[in-house]
Amino acid sequence: MEIEINDRSLSLIQGDITISSTEVIVNAANSSLMGGGGVDGAIHKVGGPVILKECKIIIKKQGNLPPGKAVITTGGNLKAKYVIHTVGPIWSGGNRKEADLLVSSYKESLKLAEKNNLHSISFPSISTGAYGYPVNKAARLALKTVTSFLKEEASSIREVVFVLYGYKTYDIYQTALSEIKI
Ligand code: AR6
C-alpha cells in the first residue's frame, strides 16, 4: 500500500527491515544500545560488529539513550547506509506518557534523518514487540506522526517505508492508514 503526500511517498510493506534499501533504517533499540532480540537483534546480526562498536562510543559519550530519543550509526553490512537507533516506550497501561514517547521516537528519528540530509527511511513498528505497545494504538500514532511530518515543506525526506513483520501487523497498519485524514 502506498500513498502520496505533498509529492512524498509513504508506503507499507510486509517483510524484513534488514533487507530494506532505503538510505537509513530505524532500529527499535533499548536504552543500552547493546543489541537485543527482535528487530534490534536482526539489524545487529546482518549489519555486523561495526554497528555495536559505534553504539558503544555513543553510550560512552552521552550515557544511556532515554526513551523517545534517537542516534545514528553506520549501517555496516546492511543495504542501508545508516541505522537510526531509537528507544520506544515500554507499554504499562497507557498512563505513563507512552503515547508522547512513541510519537517522540518517530519525530526524533525523522529529524535526525533530515539533519543528515537523507531522503529515504524505513521504520519497523516501534515498541509493539517485546515492549508490548498495542499495535492498533501504535499504528495510528506512528502513521499520524509521519504523515504530519511529510506535509512539512522543508523536509529532505522523499520516501518513508513502514516494514512490518508479519501479516497481522501489516493489516493493522493498512486499516489505520486508510482511516487517517491526510
Ligand atoms: N524487520 C522488521 N520488523 C521486525 C523484524 C525485522 N527483521 N524483527 C522483528 N520485527 P521488537 P520493541 C518487528 O520486539 O517492541 C529488543 O530486544 C516485531 O515483530 O523488535 O520496540 C530491543 O533490544 C514487532 O512488530 O521491538 C529492546 O530491548 C516490531 O518489530 C526491545 O526489544 C518491534 O518489536 C524493544 O522492543
Image (tube, helix red, strand yellow):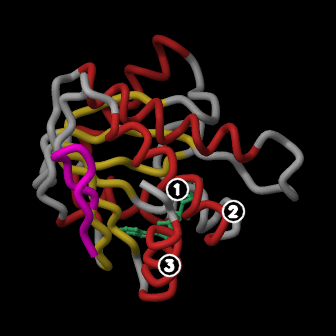
Question: Does 18 appear in magenta?
Answer: no
For label 2, the crowd category at 10 Å Cα-Cα, with few meaning under 14, some 14 to 19 and many 20 or more, is many
Report the residue at 16% width, 24% height from top.
117
Majority secondary structure of the magenta segment? strand
- Residue shown at 41% from the left, 60% from the top: 124
* Picture disc at residue 126: 1
What is the spatial separation of the Cα atoms under label 1 and label 2, in whole angstroms? 8 Å
At horizontal 69% and vertical 38% (from top left) the residue drawn is: 100
**Can you tell which quarter of the image residue 182 is in?**
bottom left
32 or 23, which is in the foreground? 23
Q: Is residue 139 left or right of residue 165?
A: right
The N terminus: image quadrant: bottom left
Q: Position of residue 144 (x, y in %)?
A: 51, 51
Position of 175 with respect to 96 (left or right) is: left
| Residue in the foreground of this view, choosing between 79 and 119 | 119
Q: State which region is magenta.
A: 1-10
Residue at label 2? 133
> Which is nearer the N-term, disc 3 or disc 1?
1
* Tag count: 3
Q: Earlier in the sequence, mark 2 or mark 3?
A: 2
Q: Nearer the viewer, mark 3 or mark 1?
A: 3
Which of the 4 image quadrants contains residue 31? Answer: top right
C-alpha gap between disc 3 and disc 1: 17 Å
